Amino acid sequence: METLNGFKYSFTDTLRENLGLAVYNTGYQKCDPRHTWGPAARDHYLIHYVASGAGVFTCGGKSHAISAGDLFLIFPSQVVSYAADRNDPWEYYWVGFQGTEAKRMIHLAGFRKETPVLRMPEGNELRSFLLRIYQSRGNTPSADATMIGYLYLFLGCLIRENGPRRPEYGMREYLEQALRFIQYNYAGDIGVSEIADYAGISRSQLYRAFISSFNISPNEFLQKYRINEACSLLRGGRFTVTEVAGSVGYADPLYFSRVFKKVKGMTPTEYQAQALSSKPAEEAAALFPKRK
């Protein structure tokens, strides 16, 4: 609780604090010669993209000469200053943001406190994304969502150009990528080729990795994963067999039933009936546990 002229107040923007990313401010400016800002600090991340002209950005006791195509980043609580060139003052676009994802995205984009300036290749889309953020500004939920969407596109462009290239994984890491893809996409129309492509290895390498780790093929693993997810849905009793089939990646309910019986030894209908019949007994046992 803070006090201002005897008036107590407390304000916390919990919505912005809990968002992955939230736009704090946005704009653009064609600066006058020697236009300056700072020294001062911000409480959020602030990226400037220089569309034309030049200037100087100073942080951590070091000055950086900035020209068209450069970006410079102000980290939260970092004291900085910047000034437009006397003869060729810059025009820049900026976006200020914060959120639970901000630090990770900034790191992936290639910014570091020791390297707060990045240069982008010609023909990039950064100016367009920043302009869209600015044009979408407002105080409505729709404006917030639109600005955040363009902010993600802006950061995605930065990460694509400056972020880390795909590392050379060991087989364990490739396997983890494959499992993650299955976890996120089992309900869709995916197969071994899609899994291998996402993991970044060949089908034969993927096969060997699954045999070595689980003693079953990738296709068998996907099949069992889908059936286990189907069991969870069937036990809830809220979905029909047809709805469950579609929810776990089987467009044909009859084929789903055949696969389910092969894996579980009973049909989906039998499994659901058995699960629902035992549910009252399980609930009663939870309410009235046996005395030791």
Image (tube, rainbow, N blue to C red):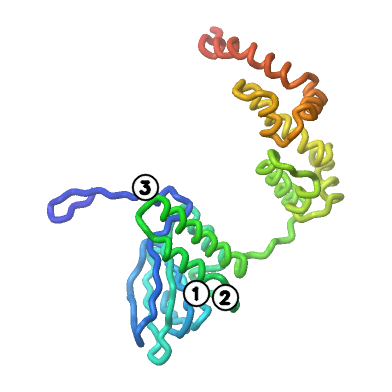
* Secondary structure of residue under mark 1: strand
The answer to whether mark 2 and mark 1 are in CB contact below 8 A is: yes
The residue labelled by disc 2 is 120
- The residue identified by callout 3 is 14
Rendered location of residue 68, percent (x, y): 50, 82
Crowding around mark 1 (Cα neighbors within 10 Å: few <14, some 14 to 19, many 20+) is many
Judging depth in this view, the residue of 172 and 153 nearest the camera is 153
Identity, as a three-letter code, of the amino acid under mark 1: Leu
The image shows residue 24, relative to residue 85, as above or below, that is above
Amino acid type of disc 3? Thr
Please name the residue that numbered disc 1 is placed on: 71
Give the left or right position of residue 212, taking residue 159 as reference: right
Category of crowding for the residue at label 2, using alpha-carbon neighbours closer than 10 angstroms: few (below 14), some (14–19), many (at least 20): some
| Picture layout, residue 78 above or below residue 4 | below
Provide residue 112's location: percent of width, then percent of height: 52, 68
Q: Is residue 198 visible?
A: yes
Which residue shows up at 76% across the image and 38% down it? 222
Whichever of labels 2 and 3 marks the residue nearer the N terminus, that label is 3
Left or right position of 153 against 58 = right
SS for dot 2: loop
Dot 3 falls on a residue whose secondary structure is helix
* Mark closest to the chain's N terminus, 3 or 1: 3
Label 3 near label 2: C-beta < 8 Å? no
Is residue 45 visible in the rendered image? The answer is no
Residue drawn at x 68%, y 31% is 229
Residue 94: give its label.
none
- In the image, farthest residue toward the bottom: 87
